[in-house]
Amino acid sequence: MELKGIEEGLRRLRDMKNKIIPTVFAHNAKDFNKRFSKLIKIANYIQIDFMDGKFVSGKSIELNKIPNLKKYKNNFEAHLMVKNPQNWVKRCLVKGFDKIIFHIEAVRNAKEAIKIIDYVKNKGKKCFVAINPSTPLERIIPLIIGSDIDGILIMGVYPGKEHQNLVGNVFARIRQIKKLNKKIVVQIDGGVNDKTALRISRAGEDLINTGSFVSEAKNPKKALMLLEKKFK
């Protein structure tokens, strides 16, 4: 059983790599339904953003207003841009999320972060920790080298708003994280478009989130395929 569990873990890590993951960024139910209905038809992997109006200034659709995700065949990840993410995790898993992403800035220390990671992993789901552009990488080093974390999400912009340009320190951060742990999965969220995707992938990124570039496109499927082509 132990060997089977290890093999399953490696399979999941391989499955997480080399993917473009569109994002549902919505402030209300109307926005959510519009974007969700587009993405559910074209993407196997979808991220849903949650904002509590405290960790970031914006506020998203409430968790209890989204549908039961278990009825869909797609894979869903929750990006928690919220304070006290530990209060959200259980409810997200009940909703059917396969992966939880929370911010290192939203917890007091590495010990608290590891407690959340262990909870998610014990439920058989994936867990990533996000880091904002201005936060020193030292905050996540204990997680990269000393926890059961699945990956790190590097914010390419300051969280909470769309239509931002990619910040300049992203590429150096990717390389630094890979140097610390070459096996860890690295994801980027924010500032991704057809002009930045290729450069990001060449820096060593494994996963890329895309927001308005796909969800607001006239042809979302075509926009997603364009990014996937750039990412190969």
Image: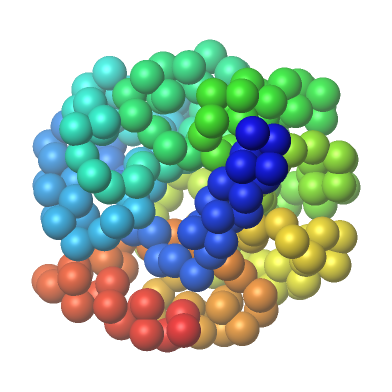
Is residue 165 something that shows in the picture?
Answer: no
Q: Residue 44, percent across and down?
A: 29, 56
Is residue 94 something that shows in the picture?
Answer: yes
**Nearer to us in this view, 228 or 71:** 71
**Nearer to us in this view, 60 or 119:** 119
Q: Residue 220, percent across and down?
A: 18, 68
Q: Which quarter of the picture shows residue 92?
A: top left
Which residue is located at x 59 percent, y 18 percent? 86
Which residue is located at x 34 percent, y 46 percent? 75
**Nearer to us in this view, 133 or 70:** 70
Query: Which of the image's four quarters has the N terminus?
Result: top right
Q: Which quarter of the picture shows residue 181?
A: bottom right
**In the image, residue 23 above or below residue 69:** below
- In the image: residue 44, left or right of residue 41: right
Which residue is located at x 54 percent, y 51 percent? 12
**Nearer to us in this view, 146 or 52:** 146
- In the image: residue 125, left or right of residue 203: left
Which residue is located at x 56 percent, y 78 percent? 201
Name the colouring of the figure.
rainbow
Q: Residue 61, percent across and down?
A: 28, 29
- In the image: residue 17, left or right of residue 116: left
Q: Residue 47, percent across and down?
A: 38, 47
Labels in figure, total: 0
Q: Which quarter of the picture shows residue 96?
A: top left
